[in-house]
Image (cartoon, helix red, strand yellow):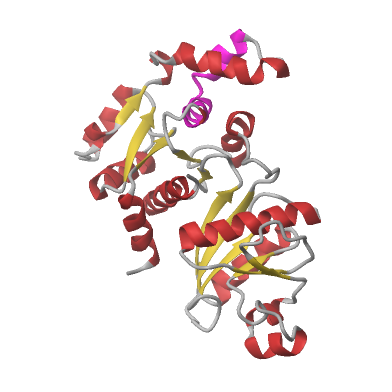
Amino acid sequence: MEFVERIKAKAAEEIKTIVLPEAAEERNIKAANQIIKEGFAKLVLIGNPDQIHHLASEYYLDEIGKATIVDPENNPKKEEYVELMLKLRASKGLTREQAEKLIVDPLYLAALMVKNGNVDGEVAGANNATGDVLRPAFQYVKTLPGISVVSGAFIMLIPDTMFGEHGMMVFADCAVHPNPTAEELAQIAVMTGRTARVIAGIEPRIAMLSLAQQMDPTLMIDGELQADAAIVPGIGAKKAPGSKIAGKANVLVFPTLEVGNIAYKLVQRMAHAEAIGPILQGMAAPINDLSRGCSVEDIVNLVAITACQAGGMK
C-alpha cells in the first residue's frame, strides 16, 4: 500500500474532525467532497453557507451536505468563543470589541474551535499566507508543554531504497524556524521523531547534522554527524565507529532553516523524490499550513495527515 493510502487508512481507524476555514473556495470544497466520500475524517467547513452550497451545486459535489457548515457572521457560538478569547488574551490587552471583530475571521474562528475542543485539527493556507494561518494558532492553541518552537517536517519518499527506511526519510526543519539554538534543535529532533512514528510509521533513527542535547531517552539520536556519515553505511562506519545511527539514519535534523529547505528541494528534484509536507510540529493540537499553490490532492492528503497527528497526540 502506498504511503498516502496508508495514512488515509490509519486516519479511518479513529475518525477525527478537521476544520477547513477556507471552505468557500474551489480547491477546498472539492477536497472536502473527496474526503467525505473517502470517509477518513469528519469536516467542519467555515464560510458563507450560500456560497458553499452554490459551489457544491456548480461542481456537482453531492457529499458536502454531510459536512458541518459554520457561518462566521452568524455563528450561534460566537459569544462563547469571544469569552474564551478574552479569558486567554485579555491580559495581553485584547478588548471585547477587538475579540468580536476577530471571531468573524475564519482563521481565528478555526483556531478557537481547535482550542475549545470542538474539532481535532485545522488545515488552511490555500488562500492565506503562512503568517496569517499561524498567528491565531500561536496566540490561542499555543505549543505543547515543554516545547517552545514550531517546526516543519517533510516526509521524503526516495526512489533509491538504500537510504533511510526503504527510501523513506524525514527532514526537519525545512519550513518554519530560521536559526534554532541547540535547545531548540533538540526540541525539533524530538518532535520530528514523533512525526516519524505517528505519520511515517517508522522507528526514528535521528541524525543531528549539528550538536544538540538529547531530550527524549526513547529516541535514538546521535550527532553531530556529517550528512554522508548519517546515511551511507560505509562512510558512517569510518567516520563514526560504534554509532547506532551513522549510516542508518532515517530522520535528518538540519542546523538552520535555509539548509533544510535547500536539502529537501535538492533531494526532491535531483533524486526524483516525493516531498510530503510541510507537516507542522510542536503545536498543542495539529494545525497545518498549505501552500497557496496547493492542489485538491494536497489538501486531501494534508487533512489525512492532520487527522493522524490528532490521533497520535492523545
Report the residue at 47% width, 63% height from top: 200
The location of residue 216, given as percent across then percent down, is 66, 58
Asked which quadrant contains residue 205, the reply is bottom right
Report the residue at 36% width, 32% height from top: 44
Q: Main secondary structure of the magenta part?
A: helix
Residue 73 belongs to the span the image colors magenta: no
> Height in image: 302 above or below 5?
above
Most foreground residue, 64 or 251: 251
The location of residue 260, given as percent across then percent down, is 67, 62
Q: In this view, does 90 lie to the left or right of 165?
A: right
Most foreground residue, 28 or 38: 38
Residue 100 belongs to the span the image colors magenta: yes
Q: Is residue 13 left or right of residue 273?
A: left
> Height in image: 197 above or below 270?
above
Asked which quadrant contains residue 58, the reply is top left
What's drawn in magenta, residue-wise?
96-114
Report the residue at 66% width, 91% height from top: 234
Most foreground residue, 243 or 308: 243
Residue 180 appears in the rendering: no
The location of residue 165, given as percent across then percent down, is 51, 75
Asked which quadrant contains residue 47, the reply is top left
User: Which residue extends farthest front?
Assistant: 217
Q: Is residue 229 left or right of residue 63?
A: right
Q: Where, quadrant-wise, is the N terminus in this rendering?
A: bottom left
Q: In this view, does 168 lie to the left or right of 263?
A: left
Total marks drawn?
0
> Height in image: 57 above or below 109?
below
Residue 37 appears in the rendering: yes
